[in-house]
Image (cartoon, helix red, strand yellow):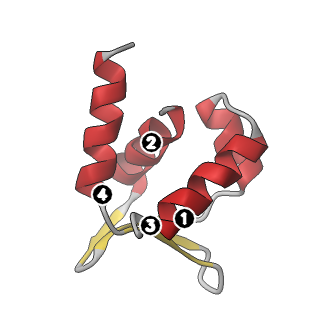
Amino acid sequence: MKLANTLVYLAENYGRKTEVGVEIFNIPSSDLADIANITVTDTRQILEKLAKNEWMEIDLSNQILHLLQFEKLSNLAQRVNAHS
């Protein structure tokens, strides 16, 4: 999943570890889509699925993405890279 790679990259390079995971700035879906080289629609659907499955939480008031399951997200990104 290209978006998983993008979120992991942003978290590793710009994120801040917290007691509940890793925080990154809430980048607009269109910008995430550009970085991940996928559509905006796909980006939004994936973010919604990650939030629904409690892998991440979007804090709109503070413009923060909380990556609650960073290890799982990182493992997913690694698995995808291994098959690329």
Which residue is under mark 1?
Answer: 25
At which x and y percent is residue 35? 63, 35
Q: Nearer the viewer, mark 1 or mark 2?
A: 2
Estimate how packed mark 3 is, as few (under 14), some (14 to 19) or many (20 or more) residues with alpha carbons within 10 Å.
many
Left or right placement of residue 5 versus residue 27 in this view: left
Question: Between tags 1 and 4, which lies in front?
Answer: 4
Q: What element carries label 1?
A: strand
Could you tell me the amino acid type at mark 2?
Answer: Ala
> Which disc, if any, is residue 56?
3
Residue 14 placement: quadrant: bottom left
Q: Is mark 4 on a helix, strand or loop?
A: helix
Disc 1 versus disc 4: distance between alpha carbons?
Answer: 15 Å
What amino acid type should be assigned to the residue bearing mark 3?
Met
Tell me which numbered mark, 4 or 2, is placed earlier along the sequence.
Answer: 2
Task: Give the CA separation, mark 3 to mark 4.
Answer: 8 Å
Seen at 46% across and 48% down, the residue is 7
